[in-house]
Amino acid sequence: MNGGASEPREVIIIGSGPAGLTAAIYTARANLHPLVIEGEPSSTSDQPGGQLMLTTEVENFPGFPDGVLGPELMAGFRAQAERFGAELLTAKATSVDFSEQPYRVWVGEACYRGRTVIVSTGAQSLLLGLHDEERLIGHGVSTCATCDGFFFRGQDIAVVGGGDSALEEATFLTRFAAKVYVVHRREELRASKIMQNRAFANERIEFLWNRQVTAIRGDDRLEGITLTDTQSGRRTELDVTGLFIAIGHRPNTDLFSAWLARKPNGYLVTEPGSTRTNVEGVFACGDVQDDIYRQAVTAAGSGCQAAIDAERWLEAHGH
């Protein structure tokens, strides 16, 4: 499609997790005929459906008392958006130009123009880079304690990390697990003192200092991990049925670095109480701008906000 000849869309949505697809549902119902550039199945950082596509059971999304599979939930989001007329393009946005209206978004050689753009490219949990790690996500390996902690009732599990997030996850997991090991590669934590004191006082938490997880084992489910001492190089085996990786998140914002304001941690800046970015007519929602909650339900809520913000912006500018 040639950038100059194509008719501008009212709304282009980049990303198709809970935020992007909720924005698609709302803008489609408002007859704005959104184009959703949903990402590529081969890319873990740009996966259609977002991080829920890597999750097995989702039990904390309202309306599903018996839980729902992550991919099944996202298939429902997708079908609902298409039912109202959203057009979904299974491809990766490769560049953008927000210098003038209508804005341009490229997918390879094809250029699409939009009067408004909603950015919902999400964030990815940083992983350890181990063999079989991604294969076992949802099968004993997790990046979200609030999502998956319930499934580890009475089990021995490990949390990797030394920041506030890691200790928060470890403390939360003691509600379910019999034992929580915190694996940290140094002998000092980065976490705040209050979080450290809380974790040190919890009798179900045991700290394994100067250790790194260097291997995980298990066929269909996680069965244990290999720890390597960062000082002596000595290896030990730890039999755990759960491994929670809490070493941080990375928002998928590289595509927008020349155009949109970002926080020091890389997340997009939006105006308080709205999804507006520093560029008029460009909105951001979901985990790409939320570095606090990072839940499917909050992402969906901000997708609704972005759709309404975009609709009002279009109306105010005579479209």
Image (tube, rainbow, N blue to C red):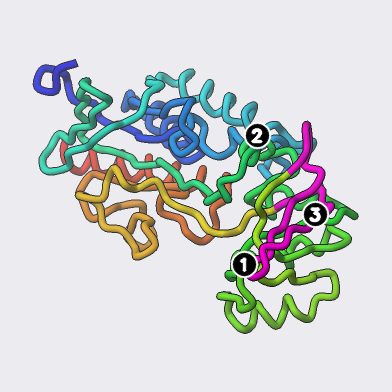
Q: Residues within 10 Å of mark 3 (few under 14, many from 20)?
A: some
Quadrant of the drawing holding the C terminus: top left
According to the picture, the residue beneath numbered tag 1 turns out to be: 185
| Distance Cα–Cα, label 3 vs label 1 | 16 Å
Residue at position x 38%, y 44% from top?
Answer: 306
Of callouts 3 and 1, which one flags the residue occurring earlier in the amino acid sequence? 1
Given the image, on which type of amino acid does mark 3 rest? Glu
According to the picture, the residue beneath numbered tag 3 turns out to be: 237
Of callouts 2 and 1, which one flags the residue occurring earlier in the amino acid sequence? 2
Q: Which x, y percent locates residue 34?
A: 34, 27
On whether residue 151 falls in the magenta region, the answer is: no
According to the picture, the residue beneath numbered tag 2 turns out to be: 135
Count the marks: 3
- Marks 3 and 1 in Cβ contact (< 8 Å): no
| Distance Cα–Cα, label 2 vs label 1 | 24 Å
In this rendering, would 248 be left or right of 233?
left
Q: Which x, y percent locates residue 125?
A: 53, 49
Choose top left, top right, bottom left or bottom right for residue 141: top right
